[in-house]
Image (cartoon, rainbow, N blue to C red):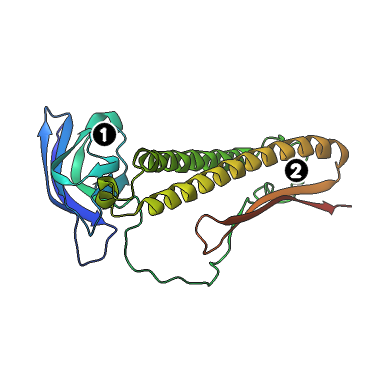
Amino acid sequence: MKLFITLLAVVSLAWPASGQSVSNVKWELENDERIVITYDLAKQGNAIYFDVALKVIIDNKAIVPKSVSGDVGNYVRMGTGKKIVWNIFDDIAELNGELSVEVSATSPVPTNTATTTSTTKKPEETVKAPDLLKDLPSGATGKGIPFWVGLGGIGATGAGLITSGMKSSSDAKDLYNVYKANTVETAAVYEEMGSTRNDVYDEANKKHKTGTFLKVAGGAVLLTAGIIMVNRLIQLKKLEQRTVSFAPYLNIDRQSTPGKVYTAGGLTLSCRLSK
């Protein structure tokens, strides 16, 4: 197997164009099985801790490496000679083509910069599950269709919400540990993070509430899937001459006030009588 490597270093950051945190990205191949990426992470404004992510593109196909270690992930401190080790063949079977690497850095907490507060309500976001019978062949009524058809997608949605909620709760715990361990407003860690002690607490509180909401919403979606399954078992016995469709929905209304999220959920049952 030929191992073709053309590595392009790409820097991506979520900062204004006036500054740059990631620079001097270099790489080397070790033992034909891992790539070692080095980079410098500079202070941006007052922030010196960053969430660092790595993305790889092979022949225009993006992948997110999982078998990585080193200076990657949450709360990476600024400095030179930062190193990420990627065990290539734990994630892909072979490397044959042009490969580019994207290192991105974002601040995990808000910085002390002037902001403009808007009272305009953000557009409502609605997540609606599809009609579970819409893809049946023409003329089909649902009779004889297994009761579990279509529930996989709903289950995956619920599991995804729960996973996101757990991640947000974990981030909240990390921030709260910083807040709890440093009780003095003038502690060096707050200056290094570019935030005040109250900012860190507010961010931790917001992430905690968001995480709790997402986990509850995920549980509600999974519960809805269970309700659908039970209803199908009942309806398939009682409504042999009817077309039945179920459309669970989760309504997420994000307000402009940080940490406040309003939601509504339910289950839509539609029946069309046939002659």
Image disc number at residue 191: none
Residue at the spot 41% in from the left edge and 72% down from the top edge? 116
Residue at the spot 56% in from the left edge and 41% down from the top edge? 215
Percent position of residue 70, x then y: 22, 34
* Above or below 41: residue 31: above
What secondary structure is found at the residue carrying circle 1? Answer: strand
Local crowd size for mark 2, using a 10 Å CA cut-off: few (<14), some (14–19), many (≥20): many
Residue at the spot 85% in from the left edge and 35% down from the top edge? 237
Residue position for label 2? 142
**How many discs appear?**
2
What secondary structure is found at the residue carrying circle 2? Answer: loop
Percent position of residue 163, x then y: 49, 38
In depth, the one of 104 and 192 nearer the eye is: 192
Inter-mark Cα distance, 2 to 1: 47 Å
Residue at the spot 23% in from the left edge and 48% down from the top edge? 103
* Above or below 94: residue 13: below
Residue position for label 1? 68
In the rendered image, is residue 215 in sight? yes
